[in-house]
Image (tube, rainbow, N blue to C red):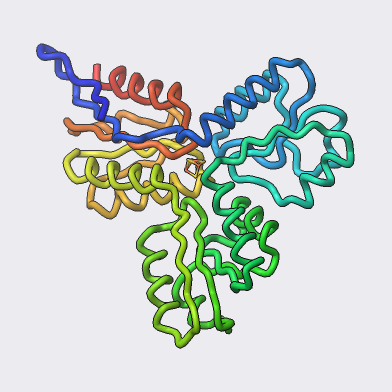
Amino acid sequence: MSSHGSHAMSNQPTIEVAAGSGVCFGVRRALELAEQAIAEGRPVYCLGPLIHNPQEVARLAEKGFRIIQSLDEAAAGTLLIRSHGLQPDVVAEARRRGLRILDATCPLVHRAQSLAAELQDAGYQVIVAGDEAHPEVRAIRGYAPAAIVVGSIEAVRRTDLSARVALVAQTTFSPDEFRRIAAALKSRDLKEVRIVNTICAATVQRQEAAAELAGRVDVMFVIGGRNSANTNRLTDICASRGVPTYHVEHAGEVTAEHLAGRRRIGIAAGASTPQWIIDAVCQRIRDLAE
Ligand code: F3S
């Protein structure tokens, strides 16, 4: 746990950053590959934002990194597959169009994709615990097209299941909800239920550390993109500890009102929040406290 402590003589509040805050190894790897590809001087494209952080996306865009919505927008160059992964048919189409592929699929996402494919091939009805609209889940389904996606145990109860089912998860899925879904499947009268937990430990640890910190500070700031699912979840977890919690994307959103009368400041950050934004928020808090 890193802490930016107060000076003994000053009136500065204490600022503590929850362990595991910010960029996980999968996103860090994707950012490094992006930087390397940009350095080669050829256009680099990514289908959808590389990370759910508008400030970092803007920084990369200045260097020539292009977020596209469709392969039609890509001329010759490199297509970077982001950490969420990409459907194999889209990758094949990109190759056919002459794009060089640089694969930054997180190894843990890759594991979920391979498992889904293998389990489907082995005759299981694959169930993915996750958010159907999330790009990671869409990519996993690209590898196991017959898979069904469930977001809650209610969805499991509504679904017709075959005799042999196998459950995997979106890497950032809630461990509690995963356990509930697994239990619901086991309570059905099926011939075989295989449970393969593909939830990312970095996500779980980040959530636990944020919850623990939220329990002993006066205010929490959770830093991350507004549309970052894992950041929104961190915000919910901290708020549920009963502490005032503010979701901010960048330092400029922290105000003096947020800090009034607060002595112990906690910070957590989502998986796609780069260190420079976390540092800027800490600096902003120190400046406002002066
Ligand atoms: Fe990978 Fe976990 Fe990050 S799945 S992209 S290391 S949150």
Q: Is residue 107 left or right of residue 46?
A: left
Reply above or below: 36 against 47: above
Q: Is residue 267 left or right of residue 154?
A: left
Q: Is residue 83 left or right of residue 220?
A: right
Reply above or below: 220 against 172: above
Picture quadrant of residue 218:
top left
Point out residue 170 in the picture as x, y percentages from the top left corner. 52, 56
Reply above or below: 209 against 142: above
Picture quadrant of residue 104:
top right
Point out residue 55 in the picture as x, y percentages from the top left corner. 55, 28
Q: Is residue 272 left or right of residue 12?
A: right
Point out residue 205 in the picture as x, y percentages from the top left corner. 33, 44
Which quadrant, please, contains the N terminus?
A: top left
Point out residue 21 in the picture as x, y percentages from the top left corner. 37, 34
- Residue drawn at x 10%, y 12% is 9
In terms of depth relative to the viewer, which is nearer, 257 or 217?
217
In terms of depth relative to the viewer, which is nearer, 261 or 155?
155
Please count the marks in the image.
Answer: 0
- Residue drawn at x 53%, y 82% is 158
Which quadrant, please, contains the C terminus?
A: top left
In terms of depth relative to the viewer, which is nearer, 190 or 145?
190
Q: Residue furthest left?
A: 9
Q: Residue furthest top?
A: 9
In terms of depth relative to the viewer, which is nearer, 284 or 122?
122
